[in-house]
């Protein structure tokens, strides 16, 4: 599996968890590009459920608006925990 | 918007819950008033304006600010450690090619310990729902018309960082001293819903 | 399941309303609610994510009808009960 690093393309989690999460609905199941690491923190989903949670990297992930909404020439950069992200294997 | 009657009922209930928590030893006498005073004394858009003005006059500072804002703002005697814990500050700068605008779609995340309370519209569903999808339309509502060639970057404060925008320095201000430049910077400019 | 707070990209909300010369708080109790929340989080009664979760669990019609700090106070009292700090009856009785 590819490492999370700036420039890597990722797909966000598609599932709709029962309870608190910090992956906005509009950014689920979408493909974006990692811009910059934004620190290391326990997953908010865990802490909201009273669990300590192991610290993990959080990333600024940039999406083209057209990929999120089907329209728009802007970008939206969302701050997402590594747990929400799966790197996309690029063809060699 | 709540009417006066609702507001006074809520007010009485808040006081009552505070008194209950004091009786259980979960609040100290006078603690709430002290925290309110600290909060109101701590954050202000003036802090953000000082940061933006310094970035305009000092390219080295601007570079450090964009790379590591928490360290850079200490040069001005400012800190992100004024709240519950030190938060990471992410600063982005507007240019002729790119305009940045900040939102928290999930709640209302904002660097309050640095900049004070956010405006009501920033917390509204109206702003939070639409600016990610149609930032050009939202900016137009705020009276900001950007050229088509200016790219718009929306930042959703969905995790642990807090965000601040350095607006573009207005034309014709080359001779102004830093303090006067800071006087030009508005809270909306620091969020990205106004140009300066 | 997605909750009412997760509004990014939704349509149907009214135009954005700006309030000229908006004060930091519109009533004293709002400042008290903000300070109370900070005090309880610092004491470890609950954490910030549990607080957000408690706001998000509000029924959508109540969430949308409530003002910003009314939502906060609803969440605070819900957490005080959930954490066993107080019963609902204790919170409903006048104190002080």
Image (spheres, coloured by chain):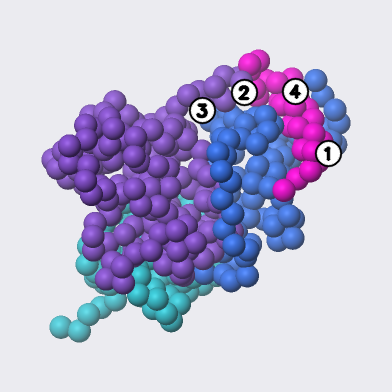
Residue A74 falls left or right of residue C30: left
Which mark, by number, is residue B19? 4
Q: In this view, does C58 lie to the left or right of A63?
A: right
Question: Which residues are the magenta region?
Answer: B1-30
Q: Mark 3 points at which residue?
A: B39
Q: Circle 1 marks a residue in which chain?
A: B
For marks 2 and 3 on the same chain, the one whose residue lies earlier in the sequence: 2
Q: Is mark 3 on a helix, strand or loop?
A: helix
Near mark 2 (Cα within 10 A), the count class, few <14, some 14-19 or many ≥20, is: many
The C terminus of chain C lies in quadrant: top right
Q: Are marks 4 and 1 in contact (CB under 8 Å)?
A: no
Instruction: Name the colour assigned to chain B in the rendering.
Output: purple
Q: Nearer the viewer, residue A22 or B116?
A: B116
- As drawn, is C57 to the left or to the right of B42? right
* Residue B179 rendering spot, x and y as whole percentages: 27, 30
To which chain does the residue with label 3 belong? B
């Amino acid at each position: 599996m590819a490492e999370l690093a700036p420039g890597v393309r990722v797909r966000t989690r598609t599932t709709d968890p029962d309870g608190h999460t910090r992956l906005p609905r509009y950014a689920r199941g979408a493909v974006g590009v990692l811009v910059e690491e934004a620190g290391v923190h326990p997953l908010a989903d865990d802490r909201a459920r009273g669990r300590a949670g192991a610290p993990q990297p959080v990333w600024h992930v940039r999406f083209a608006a057209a990929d999120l909404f089907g329209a728009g020439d802007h970008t939206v950069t969302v701050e997402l925990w590594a747990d929400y992200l799966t790197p996309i294997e690029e063809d060699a | 918007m709540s009417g006066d009657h609702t507001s006074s009922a809520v007010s009485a209930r808040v006081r009552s819950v505070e008194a209950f928590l004091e009786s259980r030893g979960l609040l100290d006498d006078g603690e709430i008033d002290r925290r309110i005073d600290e909060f109101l004394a701590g954050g202000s858009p003036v802090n953000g304006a000082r940061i933006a003005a310094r970035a305009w006059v000092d390219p080295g500072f601007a570079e450090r600010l964009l790379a590591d804002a928490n360290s850079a703002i200490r040069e001005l005697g400012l800190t992100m450690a004024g709240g519950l814990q030190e938060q990471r500050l992410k600063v982005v700068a507007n240019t002729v090619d790119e305009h940045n605008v900040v939102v928290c779609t999930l709640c209302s995340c904002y660097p309050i310990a640095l900049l004070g309370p956010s405006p009501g519209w920033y917390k509204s569903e109206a702003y939070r729902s639409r600016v990610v999808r149609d930032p050009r339309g939202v900016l137009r509502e705020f009276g900001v018309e950007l050229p088509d060639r200016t790219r718009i970057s929306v930042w959703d404060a969905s995790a642990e960082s807090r965000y601040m925008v350095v607006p573009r320095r207005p034309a014709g201000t080359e001779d102004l001293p830093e303090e006067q430049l800071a006087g030009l910077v508005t809270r909306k400019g620091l969020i990205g819903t106004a140009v300066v | 399941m997605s909750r009412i707070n997760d509004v990014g990209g939704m349509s149907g909300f009214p135009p954005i309303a700006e309030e000229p010369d908006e004060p930091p708080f519109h009533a004293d109790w709002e400042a008290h609610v903000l300070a109370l929340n900070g005090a309880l989080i610092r004491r470890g009664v609950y954490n910030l994510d549990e607080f957000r979760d408690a706001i998000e669990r509000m029924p959508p019609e109540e969430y949308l009808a409530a003002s910003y700090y009314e939502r906060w106070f609803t969440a605070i009292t819900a957490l005080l009960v959930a954490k066993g700090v107080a019963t609902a009856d204790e919170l409903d009785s006048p104190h002080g």
